[in-house]
Structures are given as C-alpha cells and as structure tokens.
C-alpha cells in the first residue's frame, strides 16, 4: 500500500468548494437537465432563461454558436437529437438518414467518422454535443456562482463502447471532468429509492426522446443492484413524431420537398403529440388526429417496449408479480397510453411519484455528490452484452458475460497455434452468438514479442477490464518474457438502431444451430491440429514405419483432410478416430525410439 504524505492544511490551504462541488447532467435527446445536491437534497438547476428543461438543440448562425433556449424560434442551421448520432459511423447511419434531416459527409482523415454539413460548416456529433454541454456548464456556473469542472453524466443503459466514449470526449471538449457515466435507469432508481426510502425489486421504464431502456434493480439497505437491463438505443419520442409525419403525408397526399420541410413537420408533430396528452384531439394545418387514432398509431412502438420489458424480466429470472413497482422515466412516458399499456401488461399501475423529466438528473446529482463528498449508498451496475475475442475457426470465446456487475476484470489464458509464432492478433467482439461474424466487431489488438516456441507452449494471459463507465480495456501478458501490452477499446462507430436487441433475440432463436456450428468448428480445428502434428512426425521419424504402415496412415490422413470441407460432424469424427487408431503404433514406436535414444550409453549400474 502506498501512502501520500502531506503537510497539515491551514486555513489558507483549504480546497475551494467548487473544486469538489460536482453536478449531475441528464444529457437527453430532446431536453437536458442539470442538478446538484444542496444540504443533502438534490435540486434542479434552471437554465439562465429560468427553465428546468433545457432543449437539447444547437444552432450555428453567423459564426456564433447558440444552444438551448437561446435559439428561441430559429429554424435554420439548428441541430436536434444529436444524441442519436453519438458514436456512430457512416455505415451505421444509413438506417437513420430517412429520419435525420441532415446532410452527412465523410471525414478526409477518418473515413468512418461522421460529420454533419450545417450550412457549409462540418461538425462531428461530438463537437455538437460539446457545444450543448458548454451551455449546460455556463448555466450551472451562473446559478451556483462559481466554476463547475466536474460532472456525472447519464447515458442510456444500452449505449455501447463507442457511444459512451463519444459522450466522454464531448464532455472533455466542454471543459468537464466526467466523474462517471451513469446509466439513466440506475440514476432514476437512485433518485427514486433515496427520495421515497424504498426497498425491493423495481423496474425502471425509461422512454425518452431518442432511447428506450428497461432495467430491473434491487434496492436494499442503500445498495442499488442492477439485475438485468434491456432496451433499444434508437427508440423513443422521435420515432413517434416520425409516425405522425408519415400519417400526415399519407392522409394529405403530400411529399417532403426538403430537409427544412422535414424539420418543420417533425416540430409540428411533436407539438401535436404533447397536445394529445391532455386533449382528445389535436392537429396542424388541415390534419387532425384523435387520441384513439394516436394510440393505434403508436401501438407498435409501445408493444416493442413491452416485449423488451418481458425479456429483461426473464433475464433477471423474475415474474411480473415479483416487482414492487414500475417507475416511469422520460418525457415520452407522459403519454397516457404508455402507462395504460404497462398497467394492462403487468397488472400494476406504474409509479410517477417524481417528475419523469427530472428524476434522472436528480440521481446523477446524488451520485456526483457521493463521488466527491461521500455517500452511504452503493451502485452495482452491469454490462449489457457479452465481451470476448475471436479464436481459431472464427469462434467467440466470451471473457465477460452479459449482465456481469461492473466494474469488473476477468482473465483467460490462451496459447499459440503454430510453431515459432511471435505475434497474435486479437479481435475483440461484443454479442451473444457463437461465431465472431455474427457479433459486433469492437476493434483489433496486435500483441507482439511472443518468444518463438513450439505451438501451445507460450502462456498468454488476456485480461478484459470494464470500468465503472462501461468502457473496456484489453491487456495481454506473456508469462515467459513478461511482455505486456494493453489497449483501450474505442471504436469509431456504434451499434445500429436494432442491433443490440436483435443480438439477444438471435442468440435465443439460433442457439441450437450456433452450438452445432461451434462443435463442428472445434472438431475441425482439432482435426487440423492432429494432421499438422502428424505431418511433422512423419518427416522426423518415417524410418520407424514399414511402407504398409506408412501407407495406411497417409490414406487415413487424406480421408480426414478431404472431410474438413464437410459439414457432417459424425463423418469427421469417424475419420479422426480412424486416423488416431492407424497412427497409434507409430506413436508407440516414436516413444520407444525417443526412450532408447535418451538412455543410449548409460550403464544400468547408474540407476542402482
């Protein structure tokens, strides 16, 4: 243990309060919220315009950056819902271009990096998000009366490695040190559990502007433990707005002529949606929508969230009647039909004791206070999808399983496949399938300086470390030389809008096929290893065999080699067994030869 020795602090050495005072930020798709803890109680920090909900919008006008309520009714060069583009590359964005009214452009240096063309200005999602965070930082500083340098920022539970890293980068650009990236449902549970002094098992149903999360947590004596999480990082109020726009276009027999038209219609749809929260009918121009028709329109989205909810309950090995409550989070849960559907599906009325728009920020503030000034609660979050590496034959070896508590570190030992191998390429993947091609590629890691030994002799320890923010660090260590390397996995892309959920469904639907495929590949890898070893042995010790013995072994080896292209496991196993039987006398003769050679010239008297 290392101890840091310092001089006792005098009055003039006291640390200024603002250096330890941290804020919580709910960086939302539609609105963002700031909070801090005052005298042990979390409170919302209003914007400089006096509003608790700060629009998550940024505008670029005449070399000036405007954000939040500063924009007012400005319609041109305004970026909304930037959260949906965080950590995403050009390949990922193809599925979003129909609903994101922006022009995308490649980056000359990094072809996978996404840039938005805003009236001739090229901006990354990270830069735009940073401009929004700068506004939130200014608002907090104006309200508190001192500089703000530290924050806990919330992210959807199903944000992947790239999306979390992008959020951290944006905060750094804004001048904020991120104490922790906290999952939104966990933040909500923290605020709800401490405010209501609740214990038990709760579901946090979080439907915001652009994301949906469902987490099952157990609250017990100050410990907040996430049992399972599910969701869709591209499902929320924006998609409901799009459904209204699509319905408007069909009924009015109109078309969208420009990006500006789409932006305008999405804004009108959003206002209509909000009006239907309290009214039976609402509309714009010549278009009218009743609450009943609206409920029918959004039923597919509501059903999708309920399906994910049920799957997450199953992952937690719980039934609906095991829940002590369903906590509503996110502005989209204000839609009455959402609450009604949940009550019907799970036989209990959802809880809305705290403001669903503010609860996440309040939880972030509590965690920020705890990390800087101490707390009597403990958060145990989880990782949503398994992490592993690709092994021989394209198989996935899972290092950390999904729903494992974080932070965590797990090590597994691997070795080389061929003689003299001095480097190893590690392919890091994320997902639940058995084959690497069916999982999400996170990055590659070249481990060099492996001592040249016979195959299977080196002992290489691969360690996966996931920190409290859910970010992954991979390290490799070779025991013989002590060589060590590590890499922070930070891909320049993210998961597409349905990929995470689809991964889980695919792992269930294709489970048996995946296992059969895995067994086949493992058998082929074993067979190839036997063939390689046998080939070397025949070259080294062919003199111990008669021609007939050698021919029998060669014929059996040729048959096995031919079957390596087959998909019939039984045929390959029979051919491998036959080869091992034919080679058994050869193995025994090699062993006798080696023993004879080792004791040649040694008198038996030496052993007396």
Image (cartoon, grey):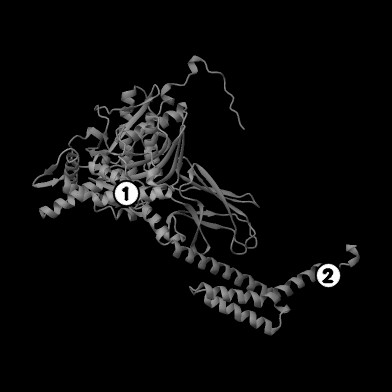
Mark nearer the viewer, 2 or 1 = 1
Q: Quadrant of residue 173?
A: top left
Q: Quadrant of residue 440?
A: bottom left
Percent x, y of residue 183: 39, 40
Crowding near the residue tagged with mark 2, few <14, some 14–19, many ≥20 C-alpha atoms within 10 Å: few
Kindly identify which residue carries mark 1.
Answer: 306
Identify the disc placed on residue 274. Answer: none
Q: Quadrant of the C terminus?
A: bottom right
Q: Is residue 224 above or below residue 607?
A: above
**Helix, strand or loop at mark 1:** helix
Is residue 330 in view from this perspective? yes
Kindly identify which residue carries mark 2.
Answer: 600
Q: Quadrant of residue 514?
A: bottom left
Percent x, y of residue 180: 43, 36
**Helix, strand or loop at mark 2:** loop
Q: What residue do we see at 65% from left, 76% from top?
A: 581
């Amino acid at each position: 243990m290392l101890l840091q020795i310092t001089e006792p602090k005098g009055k003039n050495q006291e640390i200024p309060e603002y250096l330890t005072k941290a804020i919580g930020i709910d960086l939302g798709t539609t609105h963002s919220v700031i909070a801090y803890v005052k005298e042990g109680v979390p409170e919302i920090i209003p914007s400089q315009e006096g509003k608790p909900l700060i629009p998550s919008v940024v505008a670029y006008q005449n070399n000036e950056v405007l954000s939040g309520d500063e924009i007012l009714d400005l319609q041109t060069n305004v970026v909304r819902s930037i959260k949906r583009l965080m950590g995403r590359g050009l390949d990922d964005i193809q599925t979003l271009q129909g609903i994101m009214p922006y022009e995308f452009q490649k980056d000359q240096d990094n072809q996978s990096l996404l840039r938005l063309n805003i009236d001739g200005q090229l901006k990354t999602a990270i830069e735009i998000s940073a401009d929004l965070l700068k506004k939130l930082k200014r608002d907090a500083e104006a309200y508190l009366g001192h500089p703000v340098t530290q924050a806990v920022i919330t992210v959807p539970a199903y944000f992947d490695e790239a999306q979390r890293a992008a959020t951290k980068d944006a905060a750094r650009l804004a001048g904020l040190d991120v104490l922790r990236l906290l999952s939104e449902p966990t933040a909500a549970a923290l605020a709800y559990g401490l405010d209501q002094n609740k214990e038990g098992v709760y579901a946090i149903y979080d439907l915001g502007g652009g994301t949906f999360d469902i987490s099952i947590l157990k609250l017990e004596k100050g410990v907040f433990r996430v049992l399972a999480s599910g969701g869709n990082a591209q499902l929320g109020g924006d998609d409901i707005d799009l459904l209204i726009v699509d319905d408007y276009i069909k009924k009015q027999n109109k078309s969208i002529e420009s990006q500006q038209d789409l932006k305008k219609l999405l804004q009108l749809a959003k206002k209509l949606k909000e009006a239907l929260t309290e009214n039976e009918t609402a509309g714009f121009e010549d278009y009218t929508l009743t609450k009943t028709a609206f409920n029918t329109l959004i039923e597919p989205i509501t059903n999708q969230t309920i399906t994910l909810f049920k799957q997450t309950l199953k992952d937690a090995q719980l039934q609906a009647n095991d829940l002590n409550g369903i906590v509503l989070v996110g502005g989209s849960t204000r839609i009455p039909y959402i609450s009604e559907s949940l009550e019907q599906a799970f036989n209990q009325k959802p809880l809305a004791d705290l403001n669903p728009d503010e609860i996440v920020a309040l939880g972030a503030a509590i965690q920020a206070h705890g990390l800087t000034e101490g707390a009597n609660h403990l958060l145990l979050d989880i990782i949503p999808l398994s992490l592993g590496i690709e092994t021989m034959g394209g198989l996935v070896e899972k290092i950390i399983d999904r729903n494992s508590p974080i932070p965590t570190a797990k090590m597994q030992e691997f070795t080389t496949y061929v003689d003299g191998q001095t480097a190893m390429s590690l392919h890091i993947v994320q997902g639940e399938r058995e084959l690497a091609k069916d999982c999400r590629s996170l990055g590659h890691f070249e481990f060099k300086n492996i001592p040249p030994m016979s195959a299977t002799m080196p002992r290489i320890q691969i360690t996966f470390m996931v920190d409290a923010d859910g970010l992954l660090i991979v390290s490799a260590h070779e025991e013989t030389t002590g060589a060590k390397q590590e890499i922070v996995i930070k891909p320049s892309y993210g998961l597409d809008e349905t990929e995470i959920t689809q991964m889980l469904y695919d792992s269930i639907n294709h489970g048996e096929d995946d296992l059969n495929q895995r067994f086949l590949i493992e058998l082929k890898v074993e067979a190839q290893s036997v063939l390689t070893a046998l080939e070397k042995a025949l070259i080294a010790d062919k003199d111990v065999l008669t021609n007939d013995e050698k021919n029998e072994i060669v014929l059996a080896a040729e048959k096995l080699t031919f079957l390596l292209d087959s998909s019939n496991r039984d045929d390959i196993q029979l051919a491998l067994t036959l080869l091992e039987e034919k080679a058994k006398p050869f193995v025994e003769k090699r062993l006798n030869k080696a023993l004879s050679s080792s004791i040649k010239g040694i008198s038996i008297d030496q052993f007396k």
